């Protein structure tokens, strides 16, 4: 009887091995996420998600929202992190973008930073400037404004909606733009990223944040939200500013395998977000991430799939 039981068990064992092999053969590869620069918020958030949920995604660097949208549209990455304003502006050029690109998860707000030089001390400590010192964003009329990466879109939108009339100057990266500000090639920098930006936190009080007026905030409210900036290294707290929502987007995949994998990534993000928030040293922007949140400003992927 024991021999018969052993023989009967062999086929079942074989079936188990076959099933295991089939599962191994059909194991899906991690999805590629096009995020941001190595010292930016997008890259750091996706890196911390990958550490909390290994094997779900592969995080790769990029130079901003536009590149991330392009990579998702061109099938070079399954996922990308982008600003809402980048999607809105891109939709004017790509008539079917709302059909091709969908939101998998709403992330955090990205603060819009306008940074200029502080007035250097003059005689008896009185600030001295060759021209009128910049105080608010409205003071940038006729001035040169530098930017890079995803801020290209933000500059275009704010410039078009406010008609302030600054002179835009695009740079390859933050280092080049900051060098231009330091040597007075430009008068201010526009940078978009989750507060606190590491490199802004390292600036001396030779630099300062420019505030945004209530009138300008109201004018830009269809796209941007009101917020405040605090950088104690600059001696500034509660500076009036603008913000734009960051989103994790994907192509409008129709296959069941892609849908199920994206659902798994979304659900895993929801499972670990609390642990990530409470892990010492993770980015403070995790406090703003709510995977269950939805928006009516752009189509959601999972809700669209029912």
Image (spheres, rainbow, N blue to C red):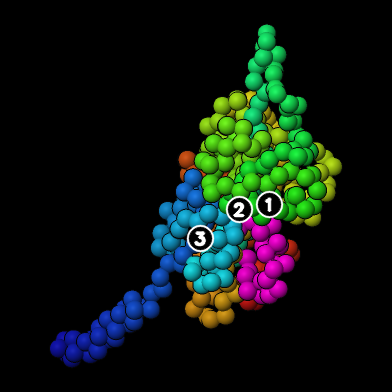
Query: Which element is circle 2 on?
Result: loop
Residue shown at the point (66%, 55%) measured from the top left: 153
**Foreground residue, 261 or 188?**
188
Quadrant showing the C terminus:
bottom right
Query: Which element is circle 3 on?
Result: strand
Q: Is residue 126 magenta?
A: no
Residue 235: x %, y % from top left: 64, 25
Q: Is residue 101 magenta?
A: yes
Residue shown at the point (64%, 46%) measured from the top left: 169
Question: Tags 1 and 2 in contact by the CB under 8 Å rule?
Answer: yes
Residue behind mark 2: 150
Q: Residues within 10 Å of mark 2 (few under 14, many from 20)?
A: many
Residue behind mark 3: 34
**Would residue 85 be visible to someone looking at this image?**
yes
Residue 154's mark?
A: 1
Lower sequence index among marks 1 and 3: 3
Q: Residues within 10 Å of mark 3 (few under 14, many from 20)?
A: many
**Foreground residue, 294 or 84?**
84
Residue 295 occupies which quadrant of the picture? bottom right
Please name which of the two marks, 2 or 3, marks the residue nearer to the observer.
Answer: 2
């Amino acid at each position: 009887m024991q021999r018969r039981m052993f023989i009967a068990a062999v086929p079942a064992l074989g079936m188990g091995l076959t099933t295991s092999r089939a599962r191994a053969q059909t194991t899906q590869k991690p999805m590629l996420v096009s995020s941001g620069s190595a010292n930016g918020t997008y890259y750091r958030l996706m890196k911390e998600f990958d550490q909390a949920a290994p094997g779900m995604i592969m995080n790769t660097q990029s130079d901003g929202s536009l590149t991330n949208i392009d990579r998702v549209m061109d099938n070079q990455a399954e996922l990308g992190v982008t600003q809402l304003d980048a999607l809105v502006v891109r939709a004017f050029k790509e008539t079917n973008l709302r059909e091709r690109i969908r939101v998998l998860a709403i992330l955090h707000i990205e603060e819009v930073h306008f940074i200029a030089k502080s007035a250097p001390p003059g005689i008896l400590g009185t600030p001295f400037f060759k021209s009128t010192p910049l105080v608010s964003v409205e003071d940038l009329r006729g001035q040169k404004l530098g930017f890079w990466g995803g801020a290209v879109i933000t500059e275009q939108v704010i410039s078009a909606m406010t008609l302030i009339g600054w002179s835009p100057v695009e740079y390859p990266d933050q280092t080049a733009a900051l060098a231009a500000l330091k040597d007075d090639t430009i008068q201010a920098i526009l940078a978009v990223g989750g507060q606190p930006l590491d490199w802004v936190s390292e600036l001396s009080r030779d630099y300062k944040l420019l505030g945004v007026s209530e009138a300008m905030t109201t004018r830009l409210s269809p796209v941007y939200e009101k917020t405040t900036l605090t950088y104690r290294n600059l001696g500034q707290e509660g500076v009036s500013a603008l913000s734009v929502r960051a989103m994790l987007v994907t192509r409008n995949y129709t296959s069941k395998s892609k849908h199920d994998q994206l659902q798994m990534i979304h659900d895993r993000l929801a499972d670990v977000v609390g642990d990530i928030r409470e892990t010492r040293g993770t980015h403070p922007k995790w406090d703003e991430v709510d995977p269950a949140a939805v928006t009516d400003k752009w189509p959601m992927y999972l809700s669209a799939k029912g």
